[in-house]
């Protein structure tokens, strides 16, 4: 926690609680006011300086020496002694989290992970038909019903299916891993009671042990050839330089990927589908010209900002957006607000896939921690939109639908996306 610096005193802008229901429901009107009146403001409930302007957020992301990532995975609120005790007794000792690592260690481990992911254009092209087939198989399950929750039944499932398969988890692990990720989300970025924390701590510890066991079963423990999976590639890197990449860090990277590779992409898919469904003309235009899908996804990234806000901590005193902050001050970089900065994006709240600079959004971050899965996420979103437009052409939102988001300070996760259509063959 940091002490508010004097710069916030006397500010006319009244800061909201970051988990106030009205703010969670729609933070953007308030963030627009903040950008105009108090572009860097102090959120007392979390002890975080919220940075909202694009130039300020980008400036912080470009300067990892002043703005460390050491705090990005720490729980935003203190964890109870009882939950910490569960972590201790249940063996939760997570290895490296790449997003929370600073150079020089970050540079070396990122190189290993990038090589293991190998999201080259050729590999992504090879994945495309598999992702399309997996999307069709998911749609097959509910197409005849005429209604579905596109978040639970499609958007949340497809990215998990893809990344778990690439990592090398068996299909039977999928549902459990996804439930554990929700525990991690609540534990690290939400507000929970002590009883909820204890329950979630057990699950997060089980999720960690599962990753450790998976690494051991993939060859980490033995001498045989590791499989042709992301885990196998990381184990090869470990064998090549065991001290620089210990086995516990291989498990740490897998623990991180399970979360990073699905939750965010699910939000992008559901959020972009919602943007299209909110206006029939948009839906029809996208359907008529599929070559616009990459631009639609880019604008979807700008407006949905699946990782809405992310942290940094000052290693030395610095001035951010005109506010002098001491070493140790913690920042909440509001990527979602930066993506709607009127100083950069004309008519920033509007959905406009033709805008020339949508690609300047910060949804994937910037600089040394820029998202390693960006190309995969974009590909998955384009494929899902294409398959849904083809398979369910008259898809619509139920009357009166109002989006609801999971209460946490980092991820803009839609609670549900109910939709209806006329099943093929129905009168
Ligand atoms: C729409 C989907 C996604 C969004 C919005 C997103 C967003 C982000 C952001 C904002 C960061 C930077 C964090 C920072 O600066 O501290 C990041 C990093 C990262 N992302 Fe993603 N991500 C997405 C999908 C994925 C996928 C599919 C994967 C893996 C297959 C992935 C893996 C990673 C990894 C490993 C990092 C850490 C990079 C580093 O610290 O060097 N992400 N992501």
Image (cartoon, grey):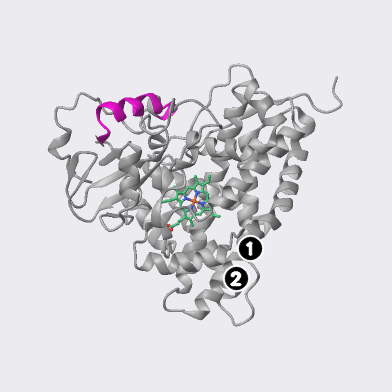
Residue visible at 62% across and 42% down in the picture: 381
**What is the residue that sits farthest to the left in this orientation?**
6
The overriding secondary structure of the stretch rendered in magenta is helix
Foreground of the two, 355 or 315 = 355
Q: Is 291 situated left or right of 314 in this image?
A: right
- Label of residue 168 in the image: 1
Dot 1 surroundings within 10 Å: few (below 14), some, or many (20 or more)?
some
- Magenta span has 36? yes
| Disc 2 residue lies near ligand 1 with CB under 8 A | no
Q: Position of residue 405 (x, y in %)?
A: 48, 32
Q: Are marks 2 and 1 in contact (CB under 8 Å)?
A: yes
Q: Which residues are magenta?
A: 24-41
Q: Position of residue 63 (x, y in %)?
A: 30, 54
Residue visible at 17% across and 51% down in the picture: 317
- On the image, numbered disc 2 is attached to which residue? 232
Quadrant of the image occupied by residue 411: top left
CA gap, disc 2 to disc 1?
8 Å
Q: Is residue 78 visible?
A: no
Quadrant of the image occupied by residue 291: top right
Q: Quick one: SS at disc 1?
A: loop
Q: Across the whole image, how many numbered discs are drawn on residues?
A: 2
Residue visible at 52% across and 79% down in the picture: 239
Q: Quadrant of the C terminus?
A: top right
Foreground of the two, 192 or 413 = 413
Q: Position of residue 225 (x, y in %)?
A: 64, 78
Foreground of the two, 97 or 340 = 340
Q: Is residue 355 above or below residue 256?
A: above
């Amino acid at each position: 926690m940091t002490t508010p610096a004097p710069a916030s005193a006397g500010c006319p802008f009244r800061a909201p609680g970051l988990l106030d229901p009205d703010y969670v429901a729609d933070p953007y009107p308030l963030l627009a006011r903040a950008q105009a009146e108090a572009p860097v403001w102090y959120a007392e409930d979390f002890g975080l300086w919220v940075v909202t302007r694009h130039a300020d957020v980008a400036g912080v992301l470009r300067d990892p020496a002043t703005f460390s990532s050491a705090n990005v995975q720490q729980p935003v609120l203190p964890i109870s002694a009882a939950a910490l005790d569960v972590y201790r007794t249940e063996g939760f000792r997570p290895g490296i989290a790449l997003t929370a690592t600073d150079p020089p260690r970050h540079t070396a481990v990122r190189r290993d992970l990038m090589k293991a992911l190998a999201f080259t254009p050729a590999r992504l092209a090879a994945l495309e038909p598999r992702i399309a087939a997996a999307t069709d198989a998911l749609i097959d399950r509910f197409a005849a019903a005429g209604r579905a929750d596109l978040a639970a039944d499609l958007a949340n499932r497809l990215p998990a299916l893809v990344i778990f398969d690439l990592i090398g988890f068996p299909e039977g692990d999928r549902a459990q891993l996804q439930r554990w990720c929700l525990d991690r989300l609540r534990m690290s970025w939400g507000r929970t009671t002590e009883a909820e924390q204890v329950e979630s701590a057990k699950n997060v510890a089980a999720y960690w042990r599962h990753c450790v066991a998976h690494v051991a079963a993939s060859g980490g423990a033995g001498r045989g050839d590791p499989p042709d999976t992301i885990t196998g590639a990381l184990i090869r890197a470990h064998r090549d330089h065991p001290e620089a990449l210990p086995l516990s860090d291989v498990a740490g990277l897998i623990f991180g990927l399970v979360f990073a590779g699905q939750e965010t992409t699910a939000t992008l898919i559901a959020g972009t589908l919602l943007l299209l469904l909110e206006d029939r003309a948009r839906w029809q235009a996208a359907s008529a010209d599929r070559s616009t899908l990459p631009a639609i996804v880019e604008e979807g990234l700008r407006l949905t900002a699946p990782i809405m806000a992310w942290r940094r901590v000052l290693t030395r005193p610095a001035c951010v957006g005109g506010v002098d902050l001491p070493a140790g001050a913690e920042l909440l970089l509001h990527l979602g607000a930066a993506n709607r900065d009127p100083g950069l994006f004309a008519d920033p709240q509007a959905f406009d896939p033709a805008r020339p600079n949508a690609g300047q959004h910060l949804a994937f971050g910037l600089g040394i921690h820029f998202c390693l899965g960006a190309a995969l996420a974009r590909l998955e979103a384009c494929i899902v939109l294409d398959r849904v437009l083809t398979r369910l052409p008259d898809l619509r939102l139920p009357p009166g639908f109002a989006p609801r988001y999971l209460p946490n300070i980092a991820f803009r996760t839609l609670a549900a996306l109910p939709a209806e259509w006329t099943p093929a063959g129905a009168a």
